[in-house]
Image (tube, helix red, strand yellow):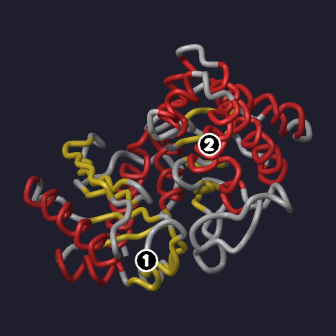
């Protein structure tokens, strides 16, 4: 697989699966690179068997609708043993040492490729999204947690054990809050700047100003998630604007360190929290300009172009690339 080498669209239709901590997205990408099937389902709170059954069910629907699909790509938020096709450990999903490739190959009889969800999102953004033309890319996906993806010299970087680019678990505050899921650390980027961290900041802001729109929403039992905070911020609620600025500045601190280390052509931020747009990006860019060394402090920071479909599209590209490699071998 060659990552951001900008080859033509996949020659055969493939299925891409983006399995997140909250949502499952399954799509079929045809031989022209167009998404011809797209379905989503909620994945939060499911037991392991239920989660795998849901993925199987949605794959069956996709293959029934498009039986010409020649391979499946899976993007999963976990450390991956790519040689064995195993999900080793997922922070925000109940998956440990699960042989996903063998399970789904046995069930559907077509090749299955598997990679970290942020890796496949990085592949998608480098090939068809906001970083087209970049040979070196840092990508963060900001949702329930924070995933990381790297394209270095045109290729996805996975590390010695397939567990590289866990950028969400870089520590930025040694005395910070405990991270979530199975992470044993404190003060990770994920712990202070994810959608989960945003909700914590929103709850604090609501408690401090109960008469504000955010405070009233909390009193009414609303979920103080990124969607609501962004909506209230766009409506002029100062407290919500401040919450997004806080999260954006924390992200910018992290981006400055990543820019110093990797000197990328671009940084791309994706995931559901990026619906906040410049309310988040502006403070992040300001911190990067202030904190990173020159010339890395001028690194462009873009919102992901492919939005919530990046992981699904990247997984389909991964499947197509590896299908072509097997054919050429």
In the image, residue 208 lies at what x, y percent? Answer: 70, 33
Residue topped by disc 1: 95
Residue visible at 43% across and 38% down in the picture: 306
Residue visible at 57% across and 38% down in the picture: 131
Res 299 → quadrant: top right
**Side of 285 where 132 appears, left or right:** left
Residue count near mark 2 (Cα–Cα under 10 Å), binned few <14, some 14–19, many ≥20: many
Above or below, 318 relative to 39: below
Q: Give the camera-side residue of 201 and 310.
A: 201
**Side of 155 where 242 appears, left or right:** right
* Quadrant holding the C terminus: bottom left
Query: Please, what secondary structure does the residue beneath circle 2 have?
Result: helix
Residue count near mark 1 (Cα–Cα under 10 Å), binned few <14, some 14–19, many ≥20: many
Q: Give the camera-side residue of 143 and 88.
A: 143
Res 325 → quadrant: bottom left
Residue visible at 82% across and 34% down in the picture: 287
**Side of 81 where 46 appears, left or right:** left
Query: Please, what secondary structure does the residue beneath circle 1 have?
Result: loop
Residue topped by disc 2: 198
**In this view of the protein, can residue 274 be seen by the observer?**
yes
Q: Give the camera-side residue of 253 and 179.
A: 179
Q: CA distance from mark 2 to mark 1?
A: 25 Å
């Amino acid at each position: 697989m060659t990552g951001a080498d900008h080859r033509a669209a996949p020659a055969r239709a493939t299925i891409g699966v983006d399995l997140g901590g909250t949502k499952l997205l399954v799509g079929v990408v045809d031989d022209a690179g167009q998404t011809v099937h797209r379905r989503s389902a909620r994945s939060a709170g499911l037991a392991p068997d239920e989660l795998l059954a849901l993925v199987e069910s949605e794959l069956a629907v996709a293959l029934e609708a498009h039986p010409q699909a020649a391979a499946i790509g899976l993007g999963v938020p976990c450390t991956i043993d790519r040689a064995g096709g195993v999900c080793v450990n997922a922070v925000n999903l109940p998956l440990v040492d699960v042989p996903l490739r063998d399970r789904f190959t046995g069930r559907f009889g077509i090749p299955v490729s598997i990679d970290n969800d942020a890796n496949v999102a990085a592949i998608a953004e480098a090939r068809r999204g906001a970083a087209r033309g970049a040979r070196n890319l840092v990508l963060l996906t900001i949702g329930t947690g924070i995933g990381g993806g790297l394209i270095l010299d045109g290729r996805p970087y996975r590390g010695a054990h397939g567990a590289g680019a866990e950028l969400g678990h870089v520590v930025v505050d040694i005395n910070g809050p405990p991270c979530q899921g199975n992470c044993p650390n404190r003060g990770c980027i994920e712990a202070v700047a994810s959608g989960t961290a945003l909700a914590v900041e929103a709850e604090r802001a609501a408690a401090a100003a109960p008469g504000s729109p955010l405070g009233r929403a909390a009193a009414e039992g609303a979920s103080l998630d990124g969607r609501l905070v962004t909506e209230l911020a766009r409506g002029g609620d100062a407290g919500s604007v401040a919450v997004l600025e806080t999260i954006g500045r924390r992200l910018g601190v992290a981006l400055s360190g990543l820019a110093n280390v990797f000197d990328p052509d671009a940084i791309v931020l994706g995931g559901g929290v990026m619906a906040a747009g410049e309310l988040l990006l502006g403070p992040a860019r300001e911190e990067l300009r202030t904190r990173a060394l020159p010339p890395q402090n001028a690194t462009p920071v873009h919102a992901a172009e492919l939005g919530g479909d990046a992981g699904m599209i990247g997984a389909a590209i991964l499947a197509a690339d590896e299908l072509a490699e097997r054919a050429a071998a």
